[in-house]
Image (cartoon, rainbow, N blue to C red):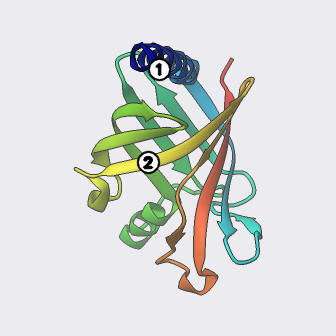
């Protein structure tokens, strides 16, 4: 009898937890506008903007399970030369794919990306919802563009589009 009672209690707890995660997933649905995109150094906790003080971007989560994101740095200008066009690639982040929710993370199976190295792989992001604010963060990594910063993570703040 104890085993059956324990099983029922555990199953109930899992259903409640699963419902909470599903609820968070439902709250992600829709369009979000970028508020901030920062890099945080693990050693110092120092944060600084990645694409300038006023980057632009949107992230969209569809009911069908697709996520799409485009981020651009502030101050972008229309290109006049081939070098300008090549340089613009350094000021954009864009990818899309099917996503799933696992606890406080979404994991996107990338099928299209400005960074071809991401295609076919997965991008995992932790998230926290507070009303109409969404905070997203990557795991801790070595940043190949600025290795002198040591171990970093990227933190994005979004506001639900009205």
In the foreground, 9 or 106 = 9
Label placed on residue 6: 1
Q: Can residue 116 be seen by looking at this rendering?
A: yes
- Residue at the outermost front position: 1
In the rendered structure, the answer to whether residue 71 lies left or right of residue 39 reads left
Is residue 91 toward the left or the right of residue 50 in the image?
left
The answer for how far apart the CA atoms under marks 1 and 2 are is 33 Å
Q: Quadrant where the C terminus lies?
A: top right
Query: Which residue lies at the image location 40% right of the left edge and 73% below the top edge?
Result: 83
In the picture of the structure, the residue carrying the numbered disc 2 is 124
Residue closest to the eye, 79 or 102: 102
Query: Residue 93: where, in percent of width, then height?
Result: 47, 53
Is 62 above or below relative to 50? above
Element type at mark 2 = strand
Name the residue located 56 percent from the left edge and 80 percent from the top edge. Answer: 146
Q: Quadrant of residue 62?
A: top left
- Label 1 CA crowd tier, 10 Å (few <14, some 14–19, many 20+): few
The residue located at (57%, 23%) in the rendering is 24
Relative to 126, residue 128 above or below: above
Percent across and percent down for residue 129 are 67, 31
The residue drawn where x is 74% and y is 66% is 48
């Amino acid at each position: 009898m104890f085993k059956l009672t324990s099983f029922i209690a555990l199953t109930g707890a899992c259903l409640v937890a699963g419902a909470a995660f599903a609820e968070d997933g439902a709250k992600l649905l829709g369009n979000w506008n970028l508020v901030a995109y920062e890099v945080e150094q693990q050693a110092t906790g120092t944060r600084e903007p990645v694409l300038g003080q006023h980057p632009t971007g949107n992230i969209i989560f569809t009911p069908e399970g697709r996520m799409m994101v485009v981020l651009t740095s502030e101050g972008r200008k229309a290109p006049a030369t081939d070098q300008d066009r090549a340089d613009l690639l350094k000021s954009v982040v864009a990818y899309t794919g099917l996503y799933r929710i696992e606890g406080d993370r979404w994991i996107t199976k990338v099928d299209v990306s400005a960074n071809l190295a991401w295609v076919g792989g997965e991008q995992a992001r932790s998230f926290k919802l507070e009303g109409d604010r969404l905070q997203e963060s990557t795991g801790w990594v070595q940043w190949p563009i600025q290795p002198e910063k040591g171990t970093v993570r990227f933190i994005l703040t979004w506001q639900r589009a009205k």
